[in-house]
């Protein structure tokens, strides 16, 4: 995909930045800076999915027009609700057609043992993200939490903004409405954004890709060939790959946004350091969790209802959360897996868990998360069952073999680094450095800069030499 490619890194992004900074903010309704940003965003998306530019334009026009109609004619709740329903219906129909049509046909074929033809629809990159953004705009407008955007091109710029278009974080219109029309761009913000972008790039190329190679080696082994320890190492490797891959993209998106004068909300807060499942979902993919909380869970009644209704609300939210991630039953199972665990924490063992030593709480959370991502990654039920059986020696697997030593020898360093950086070690070090004197602080700044240069050189070398460079969340 273009975002992780060398042409993007060395041509597209610098060219965009040069032109973006070269043009001034104009006093016209649509500024030149937004124009540059819009053009490069559409080119960016068209590079990977040229035919779906029309889809983004159609989706944004629907919400833009309904927003204006809601403002103009929505003097009564009934009219406002009508325009809201029109917009939401079109958004969901588009999402369901492109993402779930073939899934529905395959499910019907499986249930009734028939052979209906599938449509073969190709999934538009990032459709789940930009659909949720357009829906958040019209819902917030309906609630009176934001005002209607009167310039279509500004609204299209918001939805298509290339830093976060294809893999989030899910940016709400109300959060960046002011910056969309007037923003301050400073050298300090550019510097902070650049370093944040580079941190994400390092995490992606030097950690996520390397650990992903380990997972690819282990996942293809036959169930009888893999030991229990190797199976758990593989599950941990995929968990770390997914975390560093997705959080790296969020870092790069937030960094590029800051360089452009936008401030996107954080999307991760060291989720693998969680002490419970509840804590994990406060830290993992925060923009998605809060979207479901604000637009689904709370409107359903949240936890301000009786226990049976609360459990139903949780079931609905986590069913939809799983389904959002992909058109496959394993994602639904993964969502319900967390729904059940969250319900058990709420009503059964949550208070007892909180009394355990912190190391036990961390171990409990990480085991649940690692096992959950095994469900997440295998769309084929047979492959999932085989791998899970290997993790628990259900097929008579050996506990440990010499192959484990080979995997640890080849990937042990990157696994160890990933495990350390999955915890808030970096913020802790920054805090410690702040207490040092100016001399020591300046020396560390120089060392840090040299470190960034070295890591960037290593990253470029890896991008040139490695063919394995996926972005896992592009498919959503």
Image: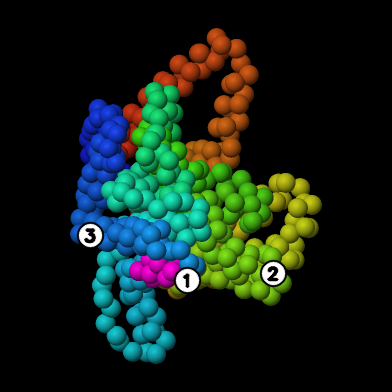
Residue 245's spot in the image, x, y percent?
42, 47
The residue labelled by disc 3 is 54
Query: What residue sits 39% from the left and 80% below the top?
Result: 107
Q: Which colour scheme is used?
A: rainbow
**In terms of secondary structure, where does tag 3 sit?**
helix
Q: Where is 196 relative to 338, above or below?
A: above
Q: Splitting the image into 4 quarters, where does residue 312 fall?
A: bottom right
| Side (left or right) of 162 relative to 395 | left
The residue labelled by disc 2 is 305
Q: Where is 105 relative to 314, above or below?
A: below
Label 3 or label 1, whichever lies nearer to me, is 1
Q: Can residue 176 be seen from the camera position used here?
A: yes
Query: What residue sits 24% from the left and 48% below the top?
Result: 42
The residue labelled by disc 1 is 78
Q: Which mark is residue 247?
A: none
Task: Answer whether labels 3 and 2 touch (C-beta < 8 Å).
Answer: no
Residue 412 lies in the magenta-colored region? no
Q: Indicate which disc, 3 or 2, sits on the residue closer to the N terminus.
A: 3
Query: What residue sits 23% from the left and 56% below the top?
Result: 53
Q: Where is 320 relative to 278, above or below?
A: below
Q: Give how far apart the Cα atoms at labels 3 and 1 are.
A: 31 Å
Would you call the spot at circle 3 few (<14 residues within 10 Å), some (14-19), or many (20 or more)? few
């Amino acid at each position: 995909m273009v975002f992780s490619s060398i042409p993007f890194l060395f041509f597209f992004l610098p060219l965009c930045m040069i032109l973006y900074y070269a043009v001034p903010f104009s006093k016209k309704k649509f500024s030149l800076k937004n124009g540059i940003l819009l053009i490069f965003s559409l080119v960016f998306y068209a590079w990977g999915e040229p035919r779906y530019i029309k889809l983004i334009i159609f989706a944004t026009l629907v919400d833009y027009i309904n927003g204006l109609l809601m403002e103009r004619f929505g003097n009564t709740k009934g009219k406002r609700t009508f325009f809201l329903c029109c917009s939401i219906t079109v958004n969901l129909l588009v999402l369901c057609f492109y993402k779930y049509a073939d899934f529905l046909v395959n499910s019907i074929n499986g249930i009734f043992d028939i052979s209906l033809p599938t449509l073969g629809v190709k999934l538009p990159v990032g459709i789940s993200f930009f659909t949720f953004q357009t829906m958040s705009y019209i819902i917030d407008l309906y609630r009176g939490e934001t005002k209607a955007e009167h310039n279509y091109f500004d609204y299209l710029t918001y939805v298509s903004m290339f830093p976060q278009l294809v893999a989030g974080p899910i940016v709400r219109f109300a959060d960046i409405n002011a910056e969309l029309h007037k923003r301050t761009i400073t050298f300090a913000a550019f510097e902070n954004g650049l370093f944040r972008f580079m941190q994400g790039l390092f995490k992606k190329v030097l950690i996520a890709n390397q650990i992903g190679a380990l997972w690819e080696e282990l996942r293809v082994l036959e169930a009888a060939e893999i030991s229990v320890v190797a199976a758990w190492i593989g599950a941990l490797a995929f968990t770390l790959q997914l975390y560093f891959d997705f959080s790296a993209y969020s870092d790069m998106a937030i960094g590029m946004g800051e360089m452009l004068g936008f401030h996107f909300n954080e999307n991760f807060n060291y989720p693998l350091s969680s002490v419970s499942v509840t804590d994990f979902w406060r830290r993992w993919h925060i923009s998605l969790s809060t979207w479901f909380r604000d637009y689904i869970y709370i409107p359903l009644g949240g936890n301000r209802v009786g226990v049976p209704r609360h459990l139903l609300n949780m079931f609905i939210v986590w069913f939809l959360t799983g389904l959002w991630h992909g058109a496959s039953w394993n994602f639904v199972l993964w969502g319900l897996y967390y729904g059940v665990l969250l319900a058990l924490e709420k009503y059964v063992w949550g208070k007892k868990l909180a009394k355990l030593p912190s190391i036990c709480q961390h171990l409990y959370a990480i085991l649940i998360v690692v096992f959950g991502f095994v469900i997440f990654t295998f769309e084929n039920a047979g492959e999932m069952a085989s791998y899970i059986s290997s993790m628990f020696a259900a097929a008579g697997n050996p506990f440990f073999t010499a192959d484990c030593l080979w995997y640890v020898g080849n990937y042990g360093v990157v696994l160890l680094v990933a495990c350390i950086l999955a915890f808030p070690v970096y913020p802790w070090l920054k805090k410690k450095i702040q207490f040092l004197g100016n001399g020591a602080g300046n020396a560390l700044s120089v060392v840090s800069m040299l470190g960034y240069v070295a890591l960037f050189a290593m990253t470029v070398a890896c991008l040139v030499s490695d063919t394995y460079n996926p972005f896992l969340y592009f498919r959503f």
